[in-house]
Amino acid sequence: MASTDRRHLLSSKTHSSEFPLKMRIITRDCCRHRVRLSAKMERRNSTSPSSMTTSVTALMALMSLEHQLAPTGNSTARMLDICQSCYILLGSMMESAADCCDGSDEYDGKTKCPNTCWEAGKAARDKLRKKIATYQEGVIIRRQEIERAKLAIVKEEGELSKLKDEEKILKGLVEKLKERKEQIEKAEEKERQQKEKEEKERREAEEAEKEKETKSDDIEPMKDDIHIGPVDEPPQDPVEHHEKSINEPELRDHSVEDRLSDKGVEGVNEDPLQNAEQLGEASPVDAKAGVDNGDQVENKAEDTESLSREELGRLVASRWTGEKTEQPKEDIDASPSKDHTNPGETPDGTNYEDDNGYDTEDDEHAYDDDVDDSESKVDDFGGEDHYDSSSSIKPESDDESDLLDMTGTSSSSWLKKIQKTVKSIFEAVNLFQTPVNISDAAHVRKEYDESSAKLSKMQSRISKLTKKLKQDFGPEKEFYSFYGQCFESKENKYVYKVCPFEKATQEEGYSTTRLGSWEKFEDSYRTMQFLNGDKCWNGPDRSLKVKLRCGLKNEITDVDEPSRCEYVALLSTPALCLDSKLKELQDKLDALNKEQPRGHDEL
Amino acid sequence: MGKPLCTVLFLLLFVNCCFSWKKDEFRNCNQTPFCKRARSRKPGACSLIATDVSVSDGDLVAKLISKENNQENSENQGKPIKPLVIRISAYQDGVMRVKIDEDQSLGPRKKRFEVPDVIVPEFLEKKLWLQRLKEEKNEDGSGILSFVYLSDGFEGVIRHDPFEVFVRESGKKGKKVLSLNSNGLFDFEQLRDKKEENEDWEERFRSHTDTRPYGPQSISFDVSFYDADFVYGIPEHATSLALKPTKGPGVEDSEPYRLFNLDVFEYIHDSPFGLYGTVPFMISHGKSRGSSGFFWLNAAEMQIDVLGPGWNDEFSSVLMLPSDQKRVDTLWMSEAGVVDAFFFVGPGPKDVVKQYTSVTGAPALPQLFAIAYHQCRWNYRDEEDVFSVDAKFDEHDIPYDVLWLDIEHTDGKRYFTWDKMLFPNPQEMQMKLAAKGRHMVTIVDPHIKRDDSYFIHKEASQKGYYVKDATGKDFDGWCWPGSSSYLDMVNPEIRSWWADKFSYDNYVGSTPSLYIWNDMNEPSVFNGPEVSMPRDALHYGNVEHRELHNAYGYYFHMATADGLVKRGDGKDRPFVLSRAFFPGSQRYGAVWTGDNSAEWDHLRVSVPMILTLGLTGISFSGADVGGFFGNPDTELLVRWYQLGAYYPFFRAHAHHDTKRREPWLFGERNTEVIKEAIHVRYMLLPYFYTLFREANASGVPVARPLWMEFPADEKTFNNDEAFMVGNSLLVQGIYTQRAKHVSVYLPGDQSWYDMKTGTAYKGGATHKLEVSDDSIPAFQRAGTIIPRKDRFRRSSTQMENDPYTLVIALNSSKAAEGELYVDDGKSFQFQKGAYIHRRFTFSNGKLTSSNLAPATAALSKFTSDCTVERIILLGLSPEPKTASVEPGNEKVDIELGPLVLREGKGQSVLTIRKPNVRISDDWTIKVL
């Protein structure tokens, strides 16, 4: 549009004489975060011009402020909550023709847009002040954090190098012990073989004699088998099987019901008979599937003819919902029929229960196995880095204390002790003495077992520390304290658990869905990315983006799923309370306060 | 439902499973006994002759009996054949009605079903009382013809032996227009008493058994359209506009076009397979004569063959068909019901549509907001989601009028309830949107959750309002809520009860800004045969479901729309979107083309689907913008918005497994382009609204095939990639990825002006145009005037008092004309004359606004202070400098201005600025 046209348009009177409003826009540059606008108004009645202009200016300031503070759409949206009408109208005003900030020229009298601009400006300043206060406090916490982190890292690095040294020594010892142990065992084995040989020869001689005596007795034991078989053992087995096959599916079915009632297709028939019916259908399906030419897996799944009416209904519904109604859900084999019919379709299904562990560090699991999976695995044993955040989870360490005694200050003493013991062993035990002295052998074995157990703990500690220290804790190590922590947020029936540097999950009752494994920080350390979570049906792998913002506590809020299986959450943390940002905010407030009085004048 | 809970297990079982159309779950013709039988009949097999031809009660009546000497040909051999009764009546404006049924005086087993509440009462009043019957000997020796006057220039004729009914141009040598049973395929299976066990009495399809207590009762016959090049209509199919032959030489083993309302999961884009709705109305068009139409009012499953030329060559000697006329033969087959057929003589395409809608009713005039942009998704999860989407539209300065809530907003799919967790304050939510002039829509489906604590179910089961199964118990099927029953909407009492449920008291949480969406009303029954209701289910009046299946959704739609009228005390026009439809659905609201897919092919097929709906009366229709299933790539989505902006019903919708796709999620540039597409729709709202009123008054659809506007231009006859919006605007979609060029055929002998640039293109030629991503080609036809409102607001309701822009595209004789219709946009007062209807005429350098509303004193008045702020003149030279406005003789400048605001590019065009004339006044502007 030619500029002349625009000016013409903009400066022209509105068509309606009831609203003689004149506006002139000098510049518009709103895409670049700043809008300078001058509005000149002639109003015979309605809103006073001064408040109009003021509010426009205030709004402009607010806009530029919000744009610079947070480029994300989120904050802009928040701003809109306060100042909806003004913003829109500005947009429209700049584009087309006359329009005013208080919505009064949107002629339909029934849809009055409240004039909230003035309040909005005030509210925005108050909000800014609050934000600044948060930052001021947060900045201090952050500094303390960073100090602590640096200390801890130094300490851990020291520990690591020390551990590595000790590991070398211990490894040598263990090897020696192993050698000795093996020697002893060899000797023992030799002894044993000797004995066995003798025994064998003796037995063979005996048997040879026996054989000669009773050659015709072969059939006897077989008869016994026949006799015993049907009477005793077989009846037991079927009963057991039977019980299983009844109990198990029942349990399964109930769990299915529970789940289903939360889902798209509701109103599960509570009649247990119906369930029994479905179960009864399981085997026909099975048989059918066998007959099915099965050119496609889905064809089998869609073999609807043998389904009960309810199953058919669920199946068809599931096409739209993408929900598996009668299908097993993760750990529980919900539907016997499906499960039996299409084992091929559930390649991952079988080991789902182990899922939670499959990608976590195996070496750690060597002794972590007894830790419940729903608990987070926490490697940080220092404990001093913890916030008082109620949502974070304290480390759960059983073996850690064990390790502590060897990583503590007395570490060298225990090492020396072992060295000494080993030495004494070598001195005391005569290698080639046969038969082997039993107590000596036991002693060696015990020493070996203990030392190698210690070694493996030490190694796992080393690998943990190595792994930890390899992590990207941010430019100032401000995220160090996140390591080994999990932040929880409860939204309706779900509990979201975000464990930085590890994984994120969504839990509902006893079922856990992985939203992703730790990937990295993004967006200059303002976002944490978790990728490759559980796969979505007909969709992507789940993923989670955690946006970070300044706050006094580590707190997960606003977990959302804007697109299916793509989650976002907000984590407020002091780690994001940057000095530079604080300064920016303060400048902003100053600017806003300065601009305030000028708003009454024309620019 | 968006939460992931369920998805894990699902993936385990269907990891690589991509769903697709489940062809096997639906019957083909060979699996449908009546279709198989009818399709295998030989031309000339019908042995019926007309006897006792007379005039009775103003109708021509006759008996159809089997001809004795023809017995050996009869397929009815061995079955008792009772005479049938045929009744032919004539109605004003060229409509002939033919009814054929069993003779009630002979006491058939039961009365066959005739679809009630479809024909509008006004039509019946147009009946011509036939006085006398003329007879003549047919020239070709085929016997006696009896004929009656039908309308000026047309006669209705019955040939006695063999029996044939047709319409011809008046006179002994008058050309045939359309005929029934010219190929002798007529068959009528009469109701029988049960005798033996065979396929006639019971039939199995997959796991479902269909009992047939009356035996087979199908009807089939052939219909011929003369001087026709193509036939169109009979929705709903995802296929081309001009119907391809389904049988005949060179046609590969195709299914007939099936008319059976079904909830088809992931339908495919080019198939004669039946979808969600049915209109058994076919319209023919040919260069030499024009158009004619045939409508069979029948709600049972129907299958229709379009027979390719030469299909009956081997029987030509028996048939005695005129060889000098081009002809399209068709075969119509229905499972049950009676023959209640309507012949429309045309001769223009618009005439046929008018004649058809005189029978089934003209499309309702929607509220203005309803023809603006709708934002939908399965599902907007909660109030917060709603507010955030609403706010984003404002933030991005994109207008929208309606936000939709799908099934998840309810408490466990109990319609009329709200999920208290997600929508704790529904009224407040609606009011918040209403404060900006926006509306909301919630879904209400016909399946009722069988839950004794659910008030609808409790009442319905107590009152016996559900459809019964074959044993007489409440039918129990499976749908979203699980075990469900279905209201028997064919019963007016139940419809009235249902309508009351929409009162503000009954529908807790509803407000006046809330409107309704009827889905799943085919009806969809997840565990029923073909995902629908068993055919032996029983309705009010002991009607079998097979007899009225296709009309079920129609009655539901009707009851819901009535509910909204009742709710608003008869003062507020209802808005109800329905997926299933039937003849007459146009009176109750909009329909959409169901669960399409995010594929280019589906974008492409949306145009013939919508045009077909328009041809068959259902003007207010659209396809889900973006495609329901799957994730459209950005380019497809953008193109869909650009095309969808010209759909009569413009709504974006998405499946809940898809990624979010609100207009601002695809980067700044794409947001801008989508916004522009939506703005085009808002700009054209005055034009669209005028067209909706035209449809309401005449039945002529908003979106029209090119041949409706250019009936003599053969090149347009099977063009279904471009279409007309009204008579002034031609729109060409872009249906391929990364298109650099597009060929657009611009019909007629007048020029066309590019809507964005004002560039003129010659008519009657195909133009290869460069395409860019910012818009799809759209052209204003020379000789037309389009009214617009160019100011952009948040919603259509905010534009009420905005001034108008008139775009005048002059033809070669420097003339143009157009119309503008305006009313309050919401009430029924327009029916009492409360509207402004202007005609703008430009000729001899003068633009005149004159009144089109009847001069008689209206019972109610509508006024508007709106003015015209810009008048754009395309094709005027030499360029005038000033204009004078009468009355007042005020001078205004003519200067150069933009054709479309916001469009940076494009040449400047002659613009008369601020003539400040009111649209309600008479005035003249003279260009000096």
Image (cartoon, rainbow, N blue to C red):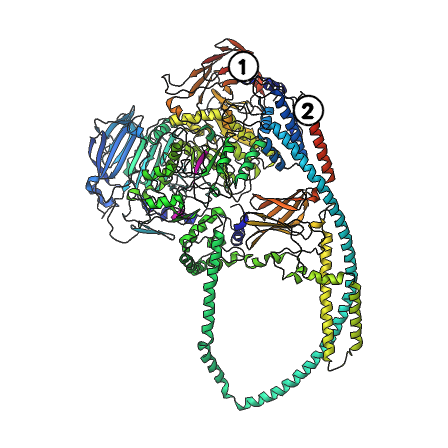
| B743 relative position to B334: left or right | right
Expressed as whole percent of the image width and height from the top left, the position of residue B405 reads: 48, 39
Name the residue tied to disc 2. Answer: A597
The reply to whether residue B711 is in sight is no
Residue B697 badge: none
Is residue B407 shown above or below A304? above
Q: Choose top left, top right, bottom left or bottom right for residue B197.
A: bottom left
- Main secondary structure along the magenta-highlighted residues: loop
Amino acid type for the residue under numbered disc 1: Ser
At 72% from the left and 67% from the top, the residue drawn is: A452
Expressed as whole percent of the image width and height from the top left, the position of residue B730 reads: 48, 27
Please state the chain letter of the residue tagged with numbered disc 1 in the rendered image.
B
Amino acid type for the residue under numbered disc 2: Pro
Please state the chain letter of the residue tagged with numbered disc 2 in the rendered image.
A
Expressed as whole percent of the image width and height from the top left, the position of residue B773 reads: 58, 32
Is residue A20 shown above or below A527? above
Give the secondary structure at mark 2.
Answer: helix
Magenta stretch in the rendered image = B514-535
Question: A463 or B342, which is in the foreground?
Answer: A463
Name the residue tied to disc 1. Answer: B877
Question: A190 or A453, which is in the foreground?
Answer: A453
Is disc 1 surrounded by few (<14), some (14 to 19) or many (20+) residues within 10 Å?
Answer: few
Give the secondary structure at mark 1.
Answer: loop
